[in-house]
Amino acid sequence: MRCSEEDKTTLGAYMLREEANHWWKNARQRLGAGGVVITWEMFKREFWVKYFPADVWNRKVVEFLELKQGNMTVAEYAAKFESLSAFSAFSPYYNIVEAEYDKCVKFESGLRPEVKHLIGFSEIRDFPTLVNKSRICDEDGRAKINHYKVVNNKRRKGQDRGKPYEDKNKKGGESVIP
């Protein structure tokens, strides 16, 4: 929004509601004692200490480092990846142009093997393109699996009609002699 540092702090404080607003009133008195101007960095630091303690921070770091696609679709995996990479610990690194290559490598390494196998040889190092191509491979693979499930279910139902060479006049395992 191109705000000054003081305006950022004012705007940030304005967005706080209920308990967070009460917390800020107390923190502002403590931080601003003696006429100290509260900077945006001071505000952020206090906010993170209060609402995002070190143990939660560390869990988010580990969650990102260990992130794998698993049962998620590529779209869900990409959304989770973006959310965690926007997290302050990684944001300064993964969200700059110079880190595009590393961001792609990290994303690709978490893809399920069947998607990574199809996409990996391309060495796509433009993140939006990598996500899009991975999503297409994932959706095509899921469609293929669903297609074969339907075909196999139809075949199984057809087997219930008996074997084509079986004597239709048999009853209880005995042959009926005409």
Image (spheres, helix red, strand yellow):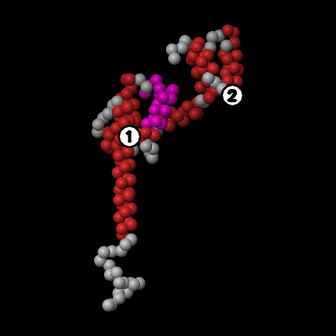
Left or right? Give the position of 136 relative to 64. Answer: left
Distance from the alpha carbon under mark 2 to that under mark 1: 41 Å
**Along the viewing direction, whichever of 8 and 44 lies nearer the viewer:** 8
Dominant SS in magenta: helix
Q: Position of residue 177 (x, y in %)?
A: 33, 90
Which element carries disc 1, helix, strand or loop? helix
Task: Examine the structure image and report whether residue 82 is included in the region drawn in magenta.
Answer: yes
Q: Earlier in the sequence, mark 2 or mark 1?
A: 2
Residue topped by disc 2: 19
In the rendered image, which quarter contains the C terminus? Answer: bottom left
Left or right: residue 59 versus residue 169 is: right
Three-letter amino acid code at disc 2? Glu
- At x 43% / y 39%, what residue is drawn? 75
- With respect to residue 3, does 105 lie above or below? below
x and y, in percent, of residue 148 in the image: 35, 56
From this viewpoint, which residue is outermost toward the top? 35
Q: Which residue is mark 1?
A: 135
Whole-percent x and y of residue 76?
A: 46, 40
Number of disc labels = 2
Q: Which mark is residue 96?
A: none
Residue appearing at x 45%, y 44% in the figure: 72
> Going by the picture, which residue comes out furthest to the front?
178
Q: Position of residue 111 (x, y in %)?
A: 39, 41
Residue at position x 60%, y 30% in the image:
53
Q: Is residue 113 magenta?
A: no
Q: Is residue 131 above or below residue 98?
A: below
Q: Residue at x 39, y 71 (%)?
A: 160
Query: Comparing marks 2 and 1, which lies closer to the viewer?
Result: 1
Which quadrant would residue 11 be assigned to in this image?
A: top right
- Which stretch appears magenta? 77-94
At label 1, which amino acid type do we have? Answer: Arg
Query: Is any part of residue 65 visible from this angle?
Result: no
